[in-house]
Amino acid sequence: MSLLSLPPELIRDILHNLDPTSFYNCLQTAKIFRQHALASTSLLHDQLARIPGQRILSDSIRRDAKALIKLFGKRATQHLFHDVARTADVHVWEAERCVDRKLSGILRWTWLEYNWGRIRLPAQVKATEDTLLLCEVKEKAGLINLYGIREGSPRLEHCISTDQFSRYLYPPSENVPTEYKIFKIAPLYAFDDVLNPCLQIALLYGPNHDSRDEESMPWKLFHLALDPKLQGARILNIYTIVPHDGDVFMDMAFAVDGRPIIAWSSSKSDPYPSLCFHHRVTIYSKEGFDDDPLSTNHHSVKLTMLSTLEADKPLLNLTKISVAGRYVHLLAADSTIPALTTKLLADRTLTEFSRRVPHLPNILEAFPGRTLAPSPLAIHHHHSVQIADLNNGNPTCVNTALQLAITRAGRFDPRKRKGAFLIKSLQYPNECHPWALTEDYPNLNHVFVAELAGLPDLYNLSSLGLVVATSPHAHRIAIASWRTLLIYSLDPRAFLDPVFSLSQLVPTTHDTDNADKDKRAGVPGDYAFIEGCGWQFYGNCGRRGECVVLEPVRVECRGVVYGLEWGGEEGFV
């Protein structure tokens, strides 16, 4: 028997018991289902209750079936209840086997994080969007291909031949490019031509591990401009870097002013190597020009170690470096919480390392600590909160930030939490200043507000670890492990803004119901919105340890996920 041939009462009863994803598909596929929905506002209210969103609706919406259907479709799309798993891998492009997957990846320029003022950005860049280029390295073939993502497919924009670098590599009298290999490709924000700026990247060349004179051979850093007219790259500068003996390259990033910052790990020959293992962060500065006859069309500049820091104790699992404003962080591959942090001072020197706490306490109350992530997902400023028990009743501003923390410290320690969490950080500034996105605050209060469910076993990960990416406005979080991709949908305002989360500004005329009044009021005196944070907005989700549990959309990818970036709020690469 066909479903459409059933009596209307049975069809409506079935629609009442459908999950939101199935109900959304029914509205899109059959006219009779949409007619049933238009004839029953109670059906639409039941389905809206199963999706995150404001629970108090205005009179113009709550009694209008067409408005309710429109609202349901909008919320279902926003929170991924529209069968998004079937649309994954819509555009699939398989790389060739000769591609070096360790060096290849996605280059990202995030323009919103910096205040460029009157600086002119490249012509192909939109200041409101991130710029993504897919980097494909074929080292044996001597090619670096850079693809732009257009309409879901990669389009070749720049092709760089590595043979043009061989004549500049050490020693200059011999053309032996096999002595060197590429260690890192990173994006830069510096612009050489103010009138006609181009995207810029840096290539770090170092000696092969099997090179006989590895310790005596310097490293070379090539500063390139991606000129769209040439469809290639122009060499702007060539930097010479001489590391310490025994240094092993870990990662490289760039400060906003274009200075390279390299993290090294070292384990010299010693009967007890674990005792002398250390990490070093070095920022390099221009020292002078080389007497190089080949440097007629570019600057060949020596880089000197302007400031070098060594960690006082060994941390063997650090693999990544992150630069946020004036702070340099070292992180492990399986965590978003920095293990070591240092600060870049005004004179371009570095302060000593500060060791971070890599674990999270398994408590329900707010706990003290410093900033948990290099940059927060979202921030909110409560202006001039006036509460009798806060600052003697004087108007006080409260800053809150939402941060993503992933940790697996303390596997068998019940006092430490394991997993991925959204943590709300609280700050009470002395003056009316918003939260600085690139600042590392030492004294904050943190409280758990959400847990990301469905993660793989954090103690049985591949060597790639977890690949984490957040959309520009933090409405999507993607976490990949090997071939599995988890996509989480969230609205940061539900955890930061009580006015939005509790529907306090929704215009209604029926507030005679005591339940609606209680929903709007929240907890008296909770000026930081930490009591029941997000519970009402995410009323359809479960809770664990007073945290909202966010379930992911699980996508099985066709290949192993090496890199992941969001191009917008809905599409990722």
Image (cartoon, rainbow, N blue to C red):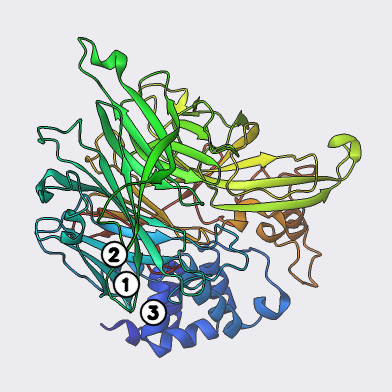
Rendered image quadrant of residue 218: top left
Q: Say whether residue 562 is left or right of residue 346.
A: left
Sequence order check: which comes first, mark 3 or mark 1? 3
Contact (CB < 8 A) between labels 3 and 1? Answer: no
Q: Quarter holding the N terminus?
A: bottom left
Which residue matches tag 3? 26
Tell me the kind of residue under disc 2: Leu
Image x and y of residue 355, in percent:
48, 25
Q: Is residue 565 visible?
A: no
Rendered image quadrant of residue 414: top left
Q: Residue at x 74, y 60 (%)?
A: 516
Between 148 and 300, the one lying in front of the other is 300
Sequence order check: which comes first, mark 1 or mark 2? 2
Using the image, tell me which numbered label, if any, was put on residue 148: 1
Q: Mark 3 or mark 1: which is in front? A: 1
Q: Say whether residue 29 is left or right of residue 40.
A: left
Contact (CB < 8 A) between labels 1 and 2? Answer: yes
Q: Residues within 10 Å of mark 2 (few under 14, many from 20)?
A: many
Tell me the kind of residue under disc 1: Gly
Q: Quarter holding the C terminus?
A: bottom left
Q: Say whether residue 362 is left or right of residue 181.
A: right
Q: Is residue 553 shown above or below 71? A: above
Spatial CA span between label 2 and label 3: 38 Å
Which residue matches tag 2? 134
Between 151 and 99, the one lying in front of the other is 99
Asked which secondary structure carries label 2, the reply is: strand
Q: Residue at x 50, y 61 (%)?
A: 475
